[in-house]
Image (cartoon, rainbow, N blue to C red):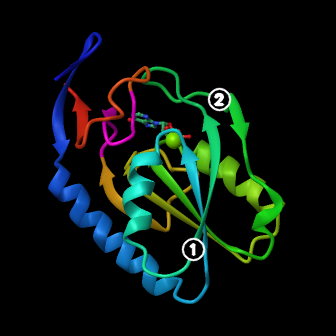
Amino acid sequence: MQIRELSFDIFISQEKLQARIQEMGAELSQLFVDKNPLFIIVLNGAFIFAADLIRNYKGNCETLFTRIKTYTGTASGEISEFTGLSKAVNNRDVIFIEDIIDTGKTVYHLQNEIELLHPASVTIVTLLQKNILRPNLVKADIIGFEIPDVFVVGYGLDYKENGRNLPEVWSLKQ
Ligand code: IMP
Ligand code: MG
C-alpha cells in the first residue's frame, strides 16, 4: 500500500485490533465500575480507537477531547499545539486515550497538565506502545499492542494527514 512516496505493509489486522479492544474495554469496565470515569481523548490520532474503545466500556462515563500536536512527518518533535483541558477534571477518575506512545513526550506533558487540575486518579490507555531501547519517559497503564520502533499508519494514525481512515494498522516497508 502506498501513501505519497512511502510504501506500507499490513501490520495489525482489523480482527486483531477489534478483539484486543474488546478485552481492553472489559478491563476498564471492571476497574472503573460505579466510578463514572472521564475519558479524555487525545486528538487527532486517537479518535478512531477511542470511538471503538468507549463502546466496549460498560457503565456510565463522560468524554472530553484534548488536542496535542508533536509529530512532523515520520519523526517525533516538540509540542507545537495544545488545547482543551477544562476544570471539569477536578476530583474525577481520568482515563487518557492515546493512539500511540513513542518517546512518551506527549503523555508526559498531558500528565503534568492534568495534575494541576487535581483529578482523583489518572490512567493512561494507549492502543500502541513503541518498545524502544532508550528508556521511555512514560509507559501506559493499559497497552493494546507493544510494537518495535517502526513508523505506522492507519486506524487513526497518519502520515502527513493521510491514512487515518484505514481499518488496519500498517507499518513502513523497511
Ligand atoms: P511521543 O510524544 O513521541 O510519544 O509521540 C506521540 C504522538 O506522535 C502520538 O500521539 C502520535 O500522534 C504521533 N506518533 C508517534 N509515532 C507515530 C507513528 O508511528 N505513526 C504516526 N504517528 C505517530
Ligand atoms: Mg497522538
Q: Are marks 1 and 2 in contact (CB under 8 Å)?
A: no
> Mark on residue 26?
none
SS at mark 1? loop
Distance in Å between CA atoms under marks 1 and 2: 32 Å
Does label 2 point to a residue whose CB lies under 8 Å from ligand 1?
Answer: no
Tell me the quarter of the picture where residue 105 sits: top right
Q: Position of residue 15 (x, y in %)?
A: 16, 56
Q: Disc 1 residue type?
A: Cys
Which image quadrant: the N terminus?
A: top left
User: Which stretch did the figure color magenta?
Assistant: 148-158
**Left or right, residue 57 beside residue 116:** left
Which residue is depicted at the point 78% across and 64% down? 88
Residue at (16%, 48%) from the top-left corner?
A: 13
Kindly identify the amino acid type of the residue bearing the numbered disc 2: Glu
- The residue sitting at the bottom extreme is 34
| Nearer to us: label 1 or label 2 | 1
Work out which residue is located at the far top of the displayed protein and give it. Answer: 5
Residue 26 position within the rendered picture, expressed as x and y whole percent measured from the top left: 36, 79
Which residue carries the number 1 mark?
61
Relative image position of residue 112 (x, y in whole percent): 75, 55
Magenta stretch, main secondary structure class: loop
